[in-house]
Amino acid sequence: MQKKINRGIVYVAGLLLLAMGIILNTKTGLGVSPIISVAYSVSVISGMNFGNMTLILYSIFVLIEMILHTIRRKKGEYVKRLFLDILQIPLSIVFTRFMNLFARFVPEYAKDCAGTFWGSVPARLMLLILAIILTGVGAAMSLNMRIIPNPGDGIVQAIADFTGKSVGFTKNCFDVCNVTITCIAGLIIKGEIIGIGAGTLLSVLGVGRVIAVYNHFFGKYRYES
């Protein structure tokens, strides 16, 4: 008989892994994840805390979700969808606080570890791969529990539902939009591209593959409330 695992524990663990993966990805200095590239570039340009900027970005995502769900109102689902949208705000507050906590203990490897192995490109590539694995596993764990979606995932689902396109296609388009906005903002304000690099491309390609592998091996596990 297959042992059941508590959904709440898996959900929280997934969010923690996701937060750590995002921060570690950022700290490698090889390029940030597309979904938070706008928040990262604005935080660098303005000097604002990265976690707080991510909270603002996530709040904008939630607002867009609510607008799309209102336009595409479905009888019997509308109130529930809006309720889940609103719950993403307190989730975002907690999630970004953990991002700030992890950011305090993870160094900027290219700068803080310069001249050591951990500051070298090979070491940072290893850390980037670890970050992609943590991000993919964390995203899969939290999404599979179907409790409250992370705003970065929630807005992709909302746009996909609104346009009738697949989630995968919508995710790719959304990533491209975020990277484009990040590049334009950096070039106009700072005269350089901020936060976009090889790590960004590897994140786009790698996170989805990690989610697929995780679901292949663990997607059939049964969970209890």
Image: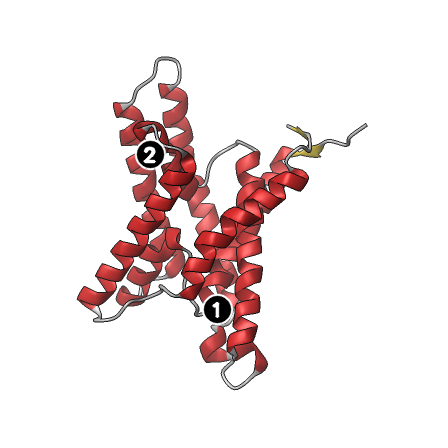
Q: Residues within 10 Å of mark 1 (few under 14, many from 20)?
A: many
Q: Mark 2 vs mark 1: which is more N-terminal?
A: 1
Which of these two is toward me, 138 or 217?
Answer: 217
Residue 45 is drawn in which quadrant? Answer: bottom left
Residue drawn at x 52%, y 78% as measured from the top left: 119
Residue drawn at x 49%, y 83% as measured from the top left: 114
Task: From this view, report whether residue 163 is shown above or below residue 181.
Answer: above
Q: Quadrant of the C terminus?
A: top right
Left or right of 2 in this view: 66: left
Task: From this view, report whether residue 214 is shown above or below residue 157.
Answer: below
Q: Look at the numbered discs 2 and 1 and tell me whether their residues touch, using CB distance below 8 Å.
A: no
Q: Amino acid at mark 1?
A: Thr
Q: Amino acid at mark 2?
A: Ile
Residue 17's tag is none
Residue 158 is drawn in which quadrant? Answer: top left
Disc 2 target residue: 159
Disc 1 target residue: 28
Give the percent coordinates (x, y) of residue 149: 46, 36
Q: Quadrant of the N terminus?
A: top right
Which of these two is toward me, 108 or 97?
Answer: 108
